[in-house]
Amino acid sequence: MRLTSIFNGLLLGALPLFAAASPGTGKAPGAAAILQTAPSGAADCQVTPGEGGELRAPLFSPKTAGCPIARVAGEDDPVLLGELADALGQAHMAGKSGARHGARPKDMDYKPTLDRLVDVRLLALEAKTMGLIDQPDARSALEAFKATTLRGMLQGQVTAKVKPDPAEVDKSFKAAVKQWKIRSVMFKQEAEAKRFREDLAKGKGFPELARAAVAAKKAEGGEPGYVSGKKLLPELAHATARLKQGEVSEPVKTTGGWVVLRIEGERYPKDAKALAEARAASLSSQQFKAIRRFYQELVKKYATVDEPLLKQLDFEARGEAGFQALAKDPRPLALIRGERPLTIADLTDDLSKKFFHGLDGPIKEHRVNPLKVDTFETLLGARLFAREAAERKLDQTAVFRAKVRQYERVLALNVFVEKVIVPGVKVTENEAKARYEKQKGELTVPAMYRLDGLGFKDRRTAEGAVQKLKGGTDLNWMRASADGQLDAEKQQLRFDGKVVSANGLPAGLAKVLSGAKNGEYRLFSSADGAEHYAVRVVEQVPPSVQPYADAREKLARELESEKIAAGLRDYAARLRKVQKVDVLITRIAG
């Protein structure tokens, strides 16, 4: 079933309406919802009486998130204050109408947002009344969601107390941030590099020999500096990783020439981002191990696995005919107490779903058997986790039921859009062309660039680098050896090889690059004067007006979305005339 994204921008520019009922983002301190009457379950809402009999509920508080603010007749669940708070908070951050960016709480117009929340309830209820939610594909999607949600909740319980492993974090962090202090020299000729290496073996000093070679214009080199593995050419990184402090490499072939390098030290600089990534990776690893152990415990608790039978199964024997024969094999691979066994046919069916273009090729290429064990454990794990979730009665918890109702509402709206609204939506060629002519001035494709370069702390150093690069010095060599470079991970301008538009570049850089050709170098200084760059234009495409043929699909999608939104608005308006809606919220006060 194709799920539309209409509810992400419901009714033209609406907010994401299905966020969890929790404190809103971009919250404005002190905002409160003024309610007409104490709602049912007022004790849970913890509303506070105000002047004139008003009941004030803090708008951005988890304590009042479950407070009802509107009810639709026939709908089991009311619209909650937390839903409105979250939607207003997101609008506040996005600067959309109804909650202008920087607006004070008393200025927020909550009514359009609440109207959209109510409209979603009305439309979802209509879909249920029409029986759309009971169609096989919708029921299948709902059951899959329930199973996934229960499994996620159970895994959450299993991993609740899991923490990163300190040793694992330390190892990953050091591998990520390690820097070597390298002294290097690059020769154009291999023979010169070998002679240099031989002289070193005779006991001559690296610095003296390097300076002499540079002075004789046989090589390029500089003073030693710290460099990370990310900045080194792959071949130099490989050579560096094999050396200990004080050791010298053999001549290494690079695109710019032959390099001889010596390791003079190493360090592990502080890097909050790298440390956070190492902790996250370790946490994920430890969580996986915990879930794996839990799976094995569940196998002992609920199942008996026929390991010899699983081991001897060959899904590649006798080609596709043999595979199809196994698809009918009823022999059990795992007996699950109190449930239907997991059979060879079950495993075969699941394996077949992994190959969308037939089995003949994968069988000949021996790509089926390697998936056997993982597929079996995934199937058995799904059954066992569902069994344990049922034992723990997770399906009876308020959290699970709320998630299911929320998803069912989303599903109902999707089906309604697909079955009721979309069939009546048509976009003509004339409409698309008219939209193109109207927006033609906005459909200019900016200049596109693929850039490379180096960042420096000092402008004079950057200027010198540009001159050397224009003179033929290899950029990668300079990246690995030049002094005064910025930390590549912290500099404002990143060179990651991706194509970027002129609109996505700093205004000053876009101006500097104007008219540049492929292969040219330009000097660019940041607006604050703190960073200076030698920028190479690897590839550039000049600006142009986007042809209608290229813009047509995007324009048609925009028109279709607008018509769908209009159809939803009209349908919801008709439902409001026949369906009772009670709104309990009066206003939002600062």
Image (cartoon, rainbow, N blue to C red):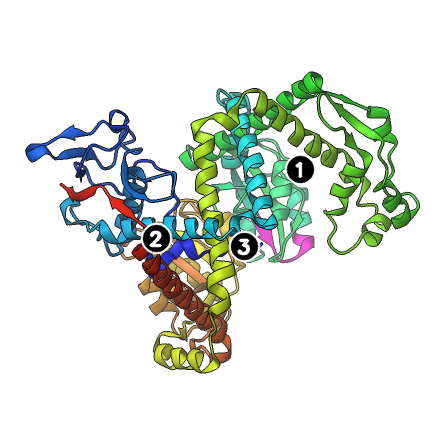
Residue 287, position as x, y percentages in the image: 55, 26
Q: Which mark is residue 492?
A: none
Q: Which residue is mark 3?
A: 476
Question: Which mark is in front, 3 or 2?
Answer: 2
* Residue bounds of the magenta highlight: 185-192
Q: How far is mark 3 from mark 1, CA to CA?
A: 30 Å
* Image location of residue 539, percent across then percent down: 51, 68
Q: Is residue 17 above or below residue 36?
A: below
**Direction from residue 187 to residue 22 in the image, left or right:** left
Would you say the residues marked 1 and 2 are in contact, meaning their CB atoms lie under 8 Å apart? no
> How many residues crowd mark 1 within 10 Å: few (<14), some (14–19), many (20+)?
few
Viewer-closest of 57 and 453: 57
| Image location of residue 74, percent across then percent down | 38, 44
Quadrant of the drawing holding the C terminus: top left
| Up/down of 56 relative to 412, above or below | above
Seen at 47% across and 69% down, the residue is 424
Using the image as rendered, state which of residue 466 and residue 369 is in the foreground.
369
Mark 3 vs mark 2, CA separation in Å? 58 Å
| Image position, residue 176 (x, y; %) | 52, 36
| Residue farthest along the front direction in this orientation | 578
Tell me, yes or no, whether the highlighted magenta stretch contains residue 227. no
* Other residues around mark 3 within 10 Å, as few (<14) / some (14–19) / many (≥20): some
Query: Pointer 1: what residue?
Result: 202
Quadrant in the picture for the N terminus: bottom right
Few, some or many C-alpha atoms within 10 Å of disc 2 (few <14, some 14-19, many ≥20)? Answer: many
The disc, 1 or 2, on the residue closer to the chain's N-terminal end is: 2
The vertical placement of 444 against 315, above or below, is below
Q: Nearer the viewer, mark 3 or mark 1?
A: 3
Badge 2 amino acid: Asp
Badge 1 element: loop
Label ID, residue 119: 2
